[in-house]
Image (cartoon, grey):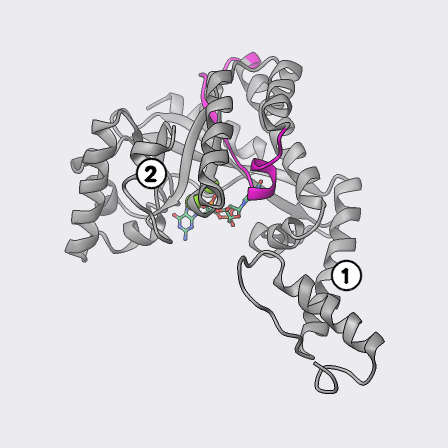
């Protein structure tokens, strides 16, 4: 609005651009210009440039966090979690750069890397003689809504030689819900390839049990926020065990995220949860460390 948001028509247009950039990502809202947007956008643009360079210089790496079968204690999979490792060794967390990548074309490059590297690494472990495990990768909503998604996944599998049953894609519910019908058709296409589908962070947002009915998922990941309280909070326990029961009746497997102690583990095992992931077993680690983990775990 003139003159509040700028002195001239030109200023107003520029500032409207700023507001538009700040709003992208948040859906269905009206976003007005504020002077503070300059700082965050200029900060993000700097970060975007640095990130683009980091991708070219191969500074992005995958760390792997083990997923454990609660019935046997054996590792059944790993989740690939991206890290930006600067030349001086500083590690930047995905919470910092993934949202910025999501607001630019960079997320596509990152996801291509994660998909191809995850498949390559898993096939390599199979060739090295480690027991077969499922590689889970995270997709952002912009990736998931690409019409060539199935082709890209198919190509990554073909190129690496990895069988589809050893790849799992993790999706969040907000992602699935932006356009439910399209999401279901995308999910079915991935299922046709034989790839597994997990619903990540279940229990945050507006998780509805009806998703278990409508979405073709194979695994439900119970969010860490439920697990943290499960020892003390009876309601959290009741919710988790009800969700596990319902998932089971739909032949959907369950995994608990963020298990940090043995008490949480035994509660979840009693509730019928299939798998577990969390610092109790291992933090996300570089390939050489997870290979040591495989070797130790094989002795159990
Ligand atoms: P997420 O997919 O829900 O990943 C789980 C996060 O929980 C990871 O954080 C992991 O380090 C952390 N975590 C696991 N076990 C425990 C535990 O016992 N205690 C605690 N306090 N935390 C635990 P991370 O690696 O920082 O990743 C954060 C988020 O960034 C991920 O959440 C995921 O949404 C996103 N992300 C990571 N890698 C990628 C990627 O390659 N592509 C995309 N699109 N997103 C990614
Ligand atoms: Mg995940
Ligand atoms: Mg999660």
Query: Mark number for residue 46?
Result: 1
Quarter of the view holding residue 22 = bottom right
Q: Does residue 57 appear in this view?
A: no
Residue found at x 54% / y 57%: 27
Between 298 and 274, the residue placed more toward the observer is 274
Quarter of the view holding residue 106 = top right
Instruction: Classify residue 45 as left or right of residue 181.
Output: right
Identify whether 32 is placed above or below 264.
below
Instruction: Classify residue 39 as left or right of residue 150.
Output: right
Instruction: Classify residue 204 as left or right of residue 167.
Output: left
Estimate the spatial distance between the alpha carbons at disc 2 and disc 1, rounded to whole Å: 39 Å
Quarter of the view holding residue 155 = top right
- The N terminus - image quarter: bottom right
Q: Does residue 45 appear in this view?
A: yes
Answer with mark 2 or mark 1, whichever residue precedes in sequence: 1
Q: Position of residue 140 (x, y in %)?
A: 56, 42
Q: Position of residue 111 (x, y in %)?
A: 63, 37
Residue found at x 66% / y 78%: 34
Secondary structure beneath label 1: helix
Residue found at x 23% / y 40%: 243
Residue found at x 81% / y 85%: 7
* Residue range of the region highlighted in magenta in the rendering: 127-147
- The C terminus - image quarter: top left
CB at disc 1 and ligand 1 closer than 8 Å: no
Which marked residue is nearer to the observer: mark 2 or mark 1?
2
Secondary structure beneath label 2: helix
146 falls in the magenta region:
yes
Query: Mark number for residue 211?
Result: 2
213 falls in the magenta region:
no
């Amino acid at each position: 609005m003139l003159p509040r948001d700028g002195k001239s028509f030109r200023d107003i247009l520029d500032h409207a651009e700023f507001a538009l950039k700040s709003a992208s990502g948040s859906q269905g809202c009206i976003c007005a210009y504020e002077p503070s947007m300059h700082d965050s956008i200029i900060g993000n643009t700097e970060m975007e440039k640095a990130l683009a360079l980091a991708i070219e210089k191969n500074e992005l790496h995958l760390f792997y966090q083990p997923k454990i079968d609660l019935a046997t204690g054996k590792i059944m999979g790993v989740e690939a979690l991206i890290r930006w490792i600067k030349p001086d060794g500083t590690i930047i967390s995905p919470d910092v750069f993934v949202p910025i990548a999501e607001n630019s074309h960079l997320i596509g490059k990152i996801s291509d890397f994660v998909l191809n590297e995850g498949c390559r690494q898993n096939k390599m472990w199979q060739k090295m003689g480690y027991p077969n495990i499922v590689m889970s990768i995270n997709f952002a909503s912009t990736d998931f809504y690409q019409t060539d998604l199935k082709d890209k996944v198919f190509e990554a599998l073909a190129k690496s030689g990895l069988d589809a049953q050893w790849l799992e894609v993790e999706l969040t519910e907000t992602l699935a819900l932006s356009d439910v019908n399209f999401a279901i058709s995308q999910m079915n296409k991935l299922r046709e390839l034989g790839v597994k589908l997990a619903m990540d962070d279940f229990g945050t947002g507006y998780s509805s049990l009806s998703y278990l009915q409508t979405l073709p998922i194979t695994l439900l990941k119970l969010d860490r926020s439920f697990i943290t309280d499960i020892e003390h909070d009876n309601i959290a326990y009741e919710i988790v065990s009800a969700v596990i029961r319902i998932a089971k009746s739909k032949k959907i497997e369950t995994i608990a995220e963020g298990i940090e102690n043995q008490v949480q583990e035994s509660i979840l095992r009693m509730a019928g949860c299939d798998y577990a992931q969390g610092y109790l077993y291992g933090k996300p680690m570089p390939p050489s460390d997870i290979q040591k983990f495989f070797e130790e775990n094989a002795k159990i």
